[in-house]
Image (cartoon, helix red, strand yellow):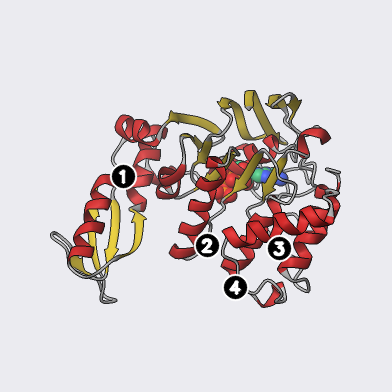
Amino acid sequence: MIRVEGLRKTYGDFPAVVGSDFAVDEGEIFGVVGPNGAGKTTTLKMLAGLVEPTEGTARVGDYDAGDPEMRRHLGFLPEESPLYEDMTARSYLRFFADLYDVPREEATRRTEDTLDRLELEHRDRRLGDVSKGMKRKVAIARSLVNDPDLLIYDEPASGLDPLTTNYVLEFTRDLADRGKTVVFSAHNLYHVESVCDRVVIMNRGEIIARGTVPEIREEHGETTYHVFTTAAVDGSEATDDGRYRRVVPDMDAVESVREAAAAAGGEVVDIRTREPSLEDVFLELAGRPPEARDDGRGRAAASGADGGRDGPDGSDGDRTGDATRTESDTAGAEGGAR
Ligand SMILES: Nc1ncnc2c1ncn2[C@@H]1O[C@H](COP(=O)(O)OP(=O)(O)OP(=O)(O)O)[C@@H](O)[C@H]1O
């Protein structure tokens, strides 16, 4: 479905992505994971044809990324997805369906079906008045109005509460089960592990590991999971807010904690990867001390750029004009897919 060869993006002399090669199969959920500034968004935008590569190729099916015909088959969810606040979910999605020339009846059927699957309430409430989780769900629904084969989601669960995060992740799995190909980026290894078939780990613009998450973890380090429960389980410790935390090394053990919590009359209320452990993997792979960890600034300073989104010379070569697109930009870009 996707074939990426020698993909490279520089902003001025700042290398945001330094030559990626990977392939994504049809129906696969493919994760692009890495710390801040690793080059995930830039990679995803090149796949979506929103950022022009400096070198290399990205092919999506029979098309070059960015080909208007390819965009008809694409649903892109940006990291930040501001919505038209005065519209309702229904009118907003109808608006985007119109941009894609989806016949009205079909648009209504598709929209309602997606909103049902996302369990979206308050479909006729002003979007300015709904929760952040609901807004994200509406943005996800928007990515599906044209019934695309390929979904590219930038941090789909970023900033959402655990319940909504689970929804979004399960929904992503459901999309793949329905034959869609999904590429998504994430910081959180748990999000990736729970749904991705395969992953690339990026750091400083480079792919430093690839494979299934168990393969990568086995090869490069130990991630621990902090499982928070409402009842004490063997080996757990009480937390300040009246919950219990059990630290475990893998998903099987997470499931054991879930069962033990249920047996004790409680439940799992949150699961977090231990951040240093995630960093340990990155640091081991990157082979550098923590103080040199990339946040997009160290390398930028070294290359004379500011590491910001405006580009060292003020021009970023970004087809959308800026990494942080406005709603009208989005409408324009989506409209271009007609
Ligand atoms: N338009 C731009 N102009 C200049 N530099 C940019 C631009 N867009 C991104 N960069 C830089 O390229 C690097 C990679 O950015 P990118 O947004 O792809 O990283 P990321 O892995 O998605 O990070 P995050 O997790 O923080 O969103 C960063 O150092 C970023 O500052």
Is the C-beta of the residue carrying label 2 under 8 Å from the nearest atom of ligand 1? no
Three-letter code, disc 3: Pro
The picture places residue 24, in percent across and down from the top left corner, at 57, 29
| Residue type highlighted by circle 2 | Gly
Q: Is residue 77 above or below residue 84?
A: above
Q: CA distance from mark 2 to mark 4?
A: 12 Å
State which image quarter holds ligand 1.
top right
The dot on residue 223 is 1
Q: CA distance from mark 3 to mark 4?
A: 13 Å
Mark 3 in CB contact with mark 4 (< 8 angstroms): no
The kind of residue tagged 4 is Ser
Sequence-wise first label, 4 or 1: 4
Q: Residue furthest left?
A: 234
Expressed as whole percent of the image width and height from the top left, the position of residue 294 reads: 49, 44
- Mark nearer the N terminus (3 vs 1): 3
Using the rendered view, name the quadrant where residue 18 is placed: top right
C-beta proximity under 8 Å, tags 4 and 1: no
Residue at which label 3 appears: 82
Mark 2 lies on residue? 159
Mark-to-mark CA distance, 4 and 1: 32 Å
Residue 131 got which mark?
Answer: 4
> Nearer the observer, disc 4 or disc 1?
4
The tag earlier along the polypeptide, 1 or 2, is 2
Q: Is tag 3's residue or tag 4's residue first in the polypeptide sequence?
A: 3
Question: Local crowd at mark 2 within 10 Å, few (<14), some, or many (≥20)?
Answer: few
* Label 3 crowd bin: few (<14), some (14–19), many (20+), radius 10 Å: some
